[in-house]
């Protein structure tokens, strides 16, 4: 996005219809000066891109267009730097009383448009309660009209009253839509269908259909809201407050107000509010909200810690290293929230399909009402008008348009809970077509750091004693190999036992420990001192050890393969997915790792530009419709991540480069999450297509039954709102898997 382009986002509080969301997106896109328009039905947000200098001119036009398209919508600007939750409100924290939201005119609203989630939930309950009361009253008046000993004008008046109680808002919205030239929406269609029933004097059915439609819409809203809140609960990682150390003590403040360099106190059970470094205390932290990892991780002085973690047991102090707006938790929430803005091909297809489906069915309804009575003698106009009304009821594509974004949003939410950030529905759907996975080695399949992988003794000393002598010898060395030996030893080294240390460049170390001469180094070191030893032909760095001029054994230092790497490769191959490894390491090391893991193809000694060339070759050889994933560490592999069909980065627990470069980010660096992401994508696609087939089949059957006079309007309403509710409930199953 160029510097001259400005992105503006609104929360659309009454956006409860997916078909309406599509209508708003298309309508806003037609405004001159709008570079891009995107409506996210699940988060109730409209995002537009405009030229910076046109903001004053375009915003009033957007507001005017929104009022014309959906009069009930009251757009509110998203608060800068604060992610809006999937229920449409800032996640977590009650906003300060003096902090107000901003509407599209740039003025401040003091009426609580961005109240906290709890208050919003209470408001929803009140609306649901009022809707049920209204339906009960309408149903009571209908029963009175049917069974009371009245007739004529009184009976008709009761039916009209019941109808208006049940559907006055539907009729009013339909009239406004006619005024604004919006004919093909569910309000207009339901109004025409039920008024047609009144015309043919099917009063009870007209009222009952409106009541049933409203009941179905209510259940649909509850189901969609439940799916939004289910995902909100999964992503409830935003901290409510921060305990800042000040000169007068500990002060509880909003995380947004904390500055870089401030020291914050985190007690057991509290969420870590900002990214930083531990400067006091030790504890275990629950990282599951970010990584999906259930095992707590220990933290101590000097360790980095990320916002979104939960402190488990000890009190720790942390120096803040990033402002809240740039913290890991904000980036993750923003990514998940906006992911469904990048629509999947299936979603785009259904949106286009719905634009043609509704007008075609409406035209068919008109022909059905007019043609048979004119062509076939003796046919009743009222009978065919009734059948046409069934077409109108069933023509709304809500079941299709609602369930698909709910399904994809549920899949993205499910993946995020497992520590996998998917930046768009298109990438989630694309995982279903992956036939080749290209992987970097270091940091992706291996740990990316030196570690002791084998200890081989000559027979006289135990493995532990050999490691201990090597650790003492390497005490004062800062080389990565020395660090890996000391880390493997893991015990306190008594420095007073070391008498002398002699560093021999290019060879190794000569150290006296407890009166024993210890030689630690490479093959040249052993040859220099004339020590007879067995050469080790291993992949990695071999450290030979001699004690008092006698060969004692060797320690192998290598970049350890990740624990789940082999199982991941096996799982990919079981799915028929080809695996390729690209590495800048030596051919011997690359081939050894590939052989151990069972990788199909390996290319070694590659520079970054060589990796791009190899990936180009893989992309050129793929079949149409197939996808190629590249998995890397997100820092050195940025060009390859960008060039692949789907770039998947090992996120390094919040690596900025990884989050920026990749389409999918694995937050805990586990290769097995590649399989998890593919599994989530498969489950999501399965549910989405279940909904498409179910909705289209039911609607198709009822259109045929309606045309032949077999179906009633009651059944047609079920085919519309009933199918929608079932499709939404089916969509949120992905959250339980």
Image (cartoon, grey):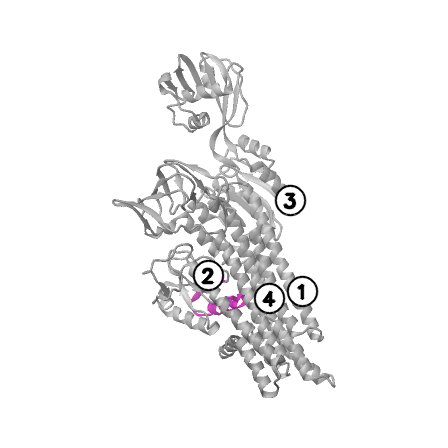
Q: For the residues carrying marks 3 and 2, which lies nearer the camera in this image?
A: 2
Q: Could you tell which of marks 4 and 3 lies nearer the N-terminus?
A: 4
Residue 80 belongs to magenta span: no
Q: CA distance from mark 1 to mark 4?
A: 15 Å
Which residue is label 4 attached to? 353
Residue found at the very far front of the displayed protein: 149
Q: For the residues carrying marks 4 and 2, which lies nearer the camera in this image?
A: 2
Q: Could you tell which of marks 4 and 2 lies nearer the N-terminus?
A: 2
Which residue is label 3 attached to? 576
Asked if marks 1 and 4 touch (Cβ < 8 Å), the reply is: no
* 70 up-or-down from 259: above or below: below
Mark 2: give few (<14), some (14-19) or many (20+) Cα within 10 Å. Answer: some
Q: Could you tell which of marks 1 and 3 lies nearer the N-terminus?
A: 3
Q: Position of residue 591 (x, y in %)?
A: 57, 33
Q: Position of residue 665 (x, y in %)?
A: 49, 47
Mark 4: give few (<14), some (14-19) or many (20+) Cα within 10 Å. Answer: some
Closer to the camera in the image, 8 or 716:
716
Q: Could you tell which of marks 3 and 2 lies nearer the N-terminus?
A: 2
Residue 22 belongs to magenta span: yes
- The residue at the point 44 percent across, 54 percent down is 334
Q: Quadrant of residue 311?
A: top left
Which residue is label 1 attached to? 697
Q: For the residues carrying marks 2 and 1, which lies nearer the camera in this image?
A: 2
Q: Position of residue 563 (x, y in %)?
A: 54, 35
Q: Quadrant of the N terminus?
A: bottom left
**Stretch in magenta:** 16-40
Which residue is label 2 attached to? 121
Determine the secondary structure under disc 4. helix
Closer to the camera in the image, 250 or 685:
250
Determine the secondary structure under disc 3. loop
Q: CA distance from mark 4 to mark 3?
A: 33 Å
């Amino acid at each position: 996005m160029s510097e001259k382009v400005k992105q503006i986002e609104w929360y659309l509080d009454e956006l409860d219809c997916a078909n309406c969301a599509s209508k708003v997106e298309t309508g806003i896109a037609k405004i001159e000066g709008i570079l891009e328009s995107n409506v996210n039905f699940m988060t109730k947000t409209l995002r537009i891109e405009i030229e910076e200098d046109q903001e004053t001119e375009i915003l009033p036009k957007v507001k005017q267009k929104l009022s014309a398209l959906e009069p009930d919508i009251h757009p509110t600007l998203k608060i800068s730097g604060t992610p809006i939750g999937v229920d449409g409100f800032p996640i977590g924290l009650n906003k300060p009383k003096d902090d107000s939201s901003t509407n599209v005119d740039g003025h401040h609203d003091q009426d609580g448009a961005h109240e906290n989630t709890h208050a919003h939930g209470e408001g929803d309950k009140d609306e649901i309660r009022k809707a049920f009361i209204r339906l009960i009253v309408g149903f009571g008046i209908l029963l009175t009209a049917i069974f009371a000993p009245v007739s004529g004008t009184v009976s008709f008046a009761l039916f009209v009253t019941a109808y208006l109680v049940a559907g006055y808002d539907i009729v009013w919205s339909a009239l406004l839509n006619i005024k604004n030239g919006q004919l093909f929406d569910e309000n207009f269609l339901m109004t025409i269908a039920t008024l047609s029933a009144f015309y043919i004097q099917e009063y009870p059915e007209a009222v009952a259909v409106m009541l049933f439609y409203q009941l179905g819409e209510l259940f649909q809203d509850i189901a969609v809201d439940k799916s939004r809140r289910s995902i909100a609960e999964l992503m409830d990682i935003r901290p409510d407050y921060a305990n800042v150390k000040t000169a007068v003590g500990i002060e509880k403040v909003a995380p947004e107000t904390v500055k870089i360099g401030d020291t914050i106190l985190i007690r057991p059970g509290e969420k870590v509010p900002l990214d930083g470094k531990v400067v006091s205390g030790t504890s275990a932290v629950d990282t599951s909200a970010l990584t999906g990892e259930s095992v707590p991780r220990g933290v101590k002085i000097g360790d980095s810690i990320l916002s979104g973690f939960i402190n488990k047991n000890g009190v720790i102090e942390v120096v803040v290293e990033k402002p809240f707006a740039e913290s890991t938790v904000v980036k993750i929430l923003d990514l998940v929230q906006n992911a469904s803005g990048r629509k999947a091909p299936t979603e785009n297809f259904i949106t286009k399909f719905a634009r043609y489906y509704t007008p075609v069915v409406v035209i068919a309804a008109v022909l059905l009402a007019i043609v048979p009575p004119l062509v076939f003698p003796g046919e009743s106009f009222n009978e065919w008008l009734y059948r046409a009304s069934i077409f109108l009821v069933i023509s709304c594509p809500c079941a299709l348009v609602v369930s698909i974004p709910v399904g994809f949003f549920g899949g993205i939410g499910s993946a995020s809970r497992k520590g996998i950030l998917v930046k768009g529905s298109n990438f989630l759907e694309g995982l279903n077509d992956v036939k080749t996975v290209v992987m970097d080695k270091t940091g992706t399949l291996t740990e990316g750091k030196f570690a002791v992988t084998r200890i081989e003794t000559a027979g006289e000393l135990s493995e532990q004693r050999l490691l201990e002598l090597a650790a003492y010898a390497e005490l004062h060395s800062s080389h990565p190999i020395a660090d890996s030996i000391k880390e493997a030893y893991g015990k306190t080294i008594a420095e007073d036992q070391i008498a002398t240390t002699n560093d021999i460049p290019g060879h190794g170390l000569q150290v006296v420990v407890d009166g024993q001469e210890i030689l630690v180094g490479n093959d040249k070191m052993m040859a220099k001192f004339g020590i007879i030893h067995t050469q080790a032909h291993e992949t990695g760095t071999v450290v030979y050890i001699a004690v008092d001029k006698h060969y004692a054994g060797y320690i192998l230092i290598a970049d350890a393969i990740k624990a789940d790497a082999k199982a991941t490769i096996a799982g990919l191959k079981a799915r028929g997915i080809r695996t390729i490894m690209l590495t800048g390491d030596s051919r011997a090391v690359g081939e050894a790792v590939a052989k151990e893991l069972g990788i199909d193809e390996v290319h070694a000694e590659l520079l970054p530009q060589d990796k791009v060339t190899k990936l180009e070759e893989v992309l050129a050889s793929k079949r149409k419709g197939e996808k190629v994933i590249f998995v890397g560490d997100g820092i050195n592999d940025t060009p390859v991540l960008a060039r692949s069909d789907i770039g998947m980065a090992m996120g390094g627990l919040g690596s900025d480069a990884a989050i920026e470069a990749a389409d999918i980010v694995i937050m805990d660096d586990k290769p097995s999450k590649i399989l998890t992401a593919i599994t989530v994508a498969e489950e999501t696609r399965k549910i989405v297509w279940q909904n498409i087939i179910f909705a289209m089949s039911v609607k198709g059957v009822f259109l045929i039954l309606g045309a032949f006079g077999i179906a009633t309007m009651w059944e047609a309403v079920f085919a519309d709102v009933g199918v929608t509710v079932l499709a939404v409930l089916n969509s949120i199953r992905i959250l339980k898997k």
